[in-house]
Amino acid sequence: MKLHPGMKKNVLDEREMQDMYRIEHTGLWGMYALLIAAIVVQLLMGAQAAQLAGEVIVVAVVSVALFVAYARKGIWDAHDRPSRRGNAVHAAVSAVGVAAVVLCVRMNVWTAAAAGAAMFLACYALLEVMMRYVAARQEAQSRELDDE
């Protein structure tokens, strides 16, 4: 196999590659969680949108990229299968988190409830669309394997 210019030959064996992927996996999700925590802390401290822009853009780009990459490969999650119940639980957790942050920042229960409800609906709808797309991708991949 010819390598592209600038690429070096892999010197790791399979076990080392698995270890490296686990480390990178943990690092990615740790960084992701810390970025979200940084956004929440800055919001609670009264930061303006301009101060949050960098972190929000990074989280948004990484979120969309992961979402698209997993969907294209027909992957849902390593520990769970897609389901309406699971989608509802994930959407509810997101909604409670958003409502809690909005309540702390705005000090208005109705605004927090509206933000939480909007997050639940948006998150649930997105997860449902994603679930259907992943199921279709998995079926297509299964047919491709059967045809071979």
Image (cartoon, rainbow, N blue to C red):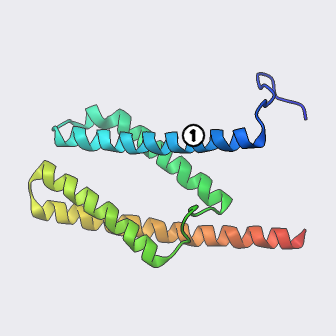
Question: x and y percent of residue 7 in the render?
Answer: 77, 26
Residue located 26% across and 63% down the image: 96
Q: In the image as oriented, which residue stretches furthest toward the front?
A: 15
How many marks do you count on the picture?
1
Q: Quadrant of residue 19?
A: top right
Residue of label 1: 23
State which quarter of the image contains the C terminus. bottom right
Q: Quadrant of residue 36?
A: top left
Question: x and y percent of residue 93 in the render?
Answer: 33, 64
Left or right, residue 51 beside residue 82 = left
Q: In the image as oriented, which residue stretches furthest toward the left?
A: 107
Residue located 45% across and 72% down the image: 86
Q: Quadrant of residue 32?
A: top left
Camera-side residue of 2 and 48: 2
Camera-side residue of 33 and 106: 33
Left or right, residue 110 beside residue 123 = left
In the displayed structure, 142 sits above or below 50; it is below
Question: x and y percent of residue 33 in the render?
Answer: 39, 45
Question: x and y percent of residue 2 in the render?
Answer: 89, 31
Left or right, residue 44 beside residue 83 = left
Left or right, residue 25 beside residue 105 = right
Q: Amino acid at mark 1?
A: Ile
In the displayed structure, 122 sits above or below 27; it is below
State which quarter of the image contains the N terminus. top right
Q: Secondary structure at mark 1?
A: helix
Camera-side residue of 48 and 21: 21
Q: In the image as oriented, which residue stretches furthest toward the top?
A: 6
In the displayed structure, 123 sits above or below 44; it is below
Residue located 83% across and 68% down the image: 145
